[in-house]
Amino acid sequence: MRLLLQERTYSLTLTILLVGIGAAIAFPQTFPTFGNWSQLLLNLSIDTIVAVGMMLLLVSGVFDLSVGSVVAFSGGVAAFGMMSLGLPVPVAGLMALASAGLIGAINGYLIAYQGINPMIQTLAMMGIVRGGALLLSGSGIQNLPYWFNALSQSRLLGVQMPVWYMLLLVGGFAFLMNKTVFFRRYYYIGGNEQAADLSGIRVKRMKLWGFIVTALLAGVAGILLASRLGTALPTAGRGLELRVITAVILGGASLSGGHGKIIGALLGAVFMGLISNVMVLARVSGYWQEIILGLILITAVWTDKALQKRGALA
Amino acid sequence: MKKLLLFSLLAVSACELPPRQAAATTALNTIANTSQSGGTEEYVMVTTAVTMPMYVNHDQATFRRWGRERGVKVSILGPAEWDVPAQINVIEEVIGTRPSGLLINGTDPAIRAVIDKAVAAGIPTVVYDSDIPQSKRHAFLGTDWYEIGQMQGKEMVRLLGGKGKIAYMGILGLTNMEAGFQGLLDVVKQYPGIEVVGKFDDKANVEEAARITSDLLSAHPDLAGLCGFDSNSGPGMGLAVKEAGRVGKVKITTVDWEPEHLQLVREGVIQMLAGQKRELFTWYGAQFLYDMVHQTNRLSASNAQTDITTVPTTVNTGLLQITKANVEEFIKRPTQ
C-alpha cells in the first residue's frame, strides 16, 4: 500500500476520489450530477491540453512560461485570419498552429542551441507574444464564424468537444511517452542530460522539439478557447502558465526533471478543477481559493517527499 | 484501420452541433418556485479580479449590505486575477446550482453566451459595470466608458488651455477601456494644440504606471497631461510625478475614487477623478433581481409567459466629477 501511495498517480487518484466522495455527501443535489461533471471537465480541458506539453518539458528538466501568451496569440491569429483576411476555418486554424509552432521553435532554438536560460527566454517571449496578441486582437475579435465555434461548442454524448480533444491528446501522448523511443528519450535527458548526450541522444534537437510540441499544444488550446467563447481574447491565458505548472507538479513532475507521467498532468488538472468546483459549490470566495490551492500544492509535495523518505528507509 | 474509421464515423455522426439560435428559455425563477423546490433564496455575484480593492470596497461591500438588509443569502465568486475565461467557468458552475438571481460584472463581450445560458435556465440575470448589449441579460446598470473618456478629455483640454502633450494609460485589450480611450481621443482631436504622445499598458499595476510615467517625463520633458483608465493608473502616475517634482505642472485626470486617489486630489497631484457610482450598480442590480424573483410589479397575468422584464432594462448611473473643490465631501463619506 505504501509503495502504491509513493506513486503520485495512485495517491492523487485516491485523493480525488476522497474529495469527490466528500463533495457528493456535502452537496448531493449539485455535485454528483452529469451537468456538473461535464462542466468541471470542460473548465479544465484547456489547461490540461497545455499541461500535456508542460509535462513533456518538465520531464526533460525545462519549462515554458510563454504558453499562456501563446494561447491568446493563436486564438487571435485564427480569428484575424478568418475575420480580417477572410480565410476559411481550416486555413486560419493551420495558420494559428504554424505561428504557435514558430514561437516554440524560436524558444527551443535559443534555449537548446544558444544556451539562454529557459526562464529568461520564455519570460521574455511571454511579453513579446502577449504584445502581439494585443496588436492582433485589440479589445477582442468577436462574432467568429459558426463552424469555427462548432469546433468547441458541439457535443458528443452530451459532453462539449474540448473534453474529448483533451482525452484524445492525453491518451495519445501517454502512449507516445510510454511506448516510443523518441519520447522516452525525454526521461533520459531529464534524468541526466550529460549522460544522455554521451549515450548518443541528440539532446539539443530533442529540446527544440519539446518546445515546438508544447507551443503547438498551447496553439490548439488557444484555438479551442476562442472557439468555445466565440471570441478571441487578447487577455486569454493570463496566469495559465503557473496554473499548468502547478497541475503538472501536483501530477508528479519534478522541476529538476526525469519524473512525471502524462496521466499525472490530467490528474493534477482534475484535482485543481475539482477543488475549484467544490469551492464554487460551497460559495468560498476567490480570496480563499488562491490560499487553499497554494496550501494544497505545498501539502502534496511535502507528503510526497515524506513518503519517498519513508520508502527509502524501509 | 477499418474499425478505427468506423468508430470515427460513428463519433462524428453522434456529434451534436451547437444551435444556431438561442435555446428555449425555461420559466423564470420566482420566490414561489424557489420555495416549492425547498431552496433558499440566494443571490450570487460573479466578477473577475474579485480581490481588487475597488470591487471589494464598493461593489461587494454594498452587495453584502443589501443582503443583510433584505435578509437573504448573498455570495461573491470569481477568480482573484483578471481572467475572463475563469469568470465564465465560475458562472457555468453556478448556473448548475440554480441561485435565485445572478449579478454579473460585464467584463467582456465574451461572456455573452454564458449570460444567455443563465437566462435560458430561468435565472434572473443582471449585468453591471459594462453592458453586454448583445446578450439576453434582463437588465444592465453601469456607466458608459466612452463618457468616462470624454469627461477626462474635456477636463484635460480645460486644464491645459487647449494645448500641450498628453499621454494615457490603462489595461489594453479590454473592451470598456478601449471605449474610454476612444472617448478621450474623440474630444482631444478637436484641439490641434493637443498632441497625444502615446497609449500605454500599465497592466493595472501601480509600479508599472509609475515606471511608464517616469519614462515619459524623461522622454518628453514638456509633457503636460496624463489620463488614467484603471484603478492603479492614478496612484502610479501620481507617484512618478511627485518623485519628479512636477506636481501641478503635469496635470492628471484619472478614474476611480479610492482613498489614495482622493488623497492625491487633496494634495493637488491629481486634478480630476471621473468616478463611477459603483454602489448603485450592485445595490440596485441586486434589488432588480429581488424584484424579479418576488414579482414586485406584475405587468401581466404571467410576466414569464409574455416575456416581460419587470425592471428597467438599461440604467446609466452617471459619473461623479471629483476635484479639489469637492474632494473633502468624499473623504468624509461615512462608512456604511
Image (cartoon, coloured by chain):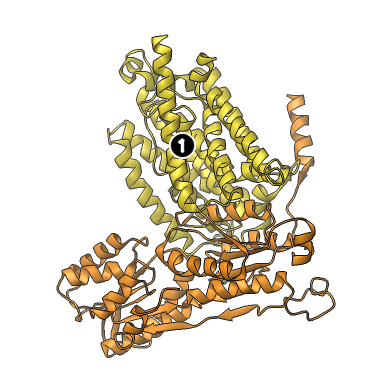
- Please identify which colour was used for chain B in the image: orange
Quarter of the picture containing the C terminus of chain B is: bottom left
Q: Is residue B258 left or right of residue B302?
A: left
Is residue B23 visible to us here? no
From what the image shows, is residue B286 above or below residue A144?
below
Q: Which residue is mark 1?
A: A296
Q: Which kind of residue does numbered mark 1 sit on? A: Ile
Quarter of the picture containing the N terminus of chain B is: top right
Residue sitting farthest toward the right: B301
- Spot occupied by residue A301 in the image (x, y as percentages of width and height): 42, 29
Name the secondary structure under disc 1.
helix
Q: Residue at x 39, y 42 (%)?
A: A65
Q: Residue at x 68, y 78 (%)?
A: B311
Q: Determine the chain carrying the residue at label 1.
A: A
Query: Crowding near pointer 1: few (<14 within 10 Å), some, many (20+)?
Result: some
Q: Residue at x 40, y 63 (%)?
A: B53
- Spot occupied by residue A67 in the image (x, y as percentages of width and height): 44, 43
User: Relative to the observer, which residue lies in front, B199 or A246?
Assistant: A246
User: Relative to the observer, which residue lies in front, B317 or B174?
Assistant: B317
Q: Quadrant of residue B164?
A: bottom left
Q: Is residue B38 left or right of residue A70?
A: right
User: Relative to the observer, which residue lies in front, B25 or B279?
Assistant: B279
- Please identify which colour was used for chain A in the image: yellow
- Spot occupied by residue A34 in the image (x, y as percentages of width and height): 72, 42
- Spot occupied by residue A259 in the image (x, y as percentages of width and height): 43, 22
Q: Residue at x 37, y 35 (%)?
A: A108
Q: Quadrant of residue A303?
A: top left
Q: Is residue B118 left or right of residue A266?
A: right
Is residue A312 visible to us here? yes
State how many labels appear: 1
Q: Is residue A250 left or right of residue A171?
A: left
From what the image shows, is residue A11 above or below residue A90?
above
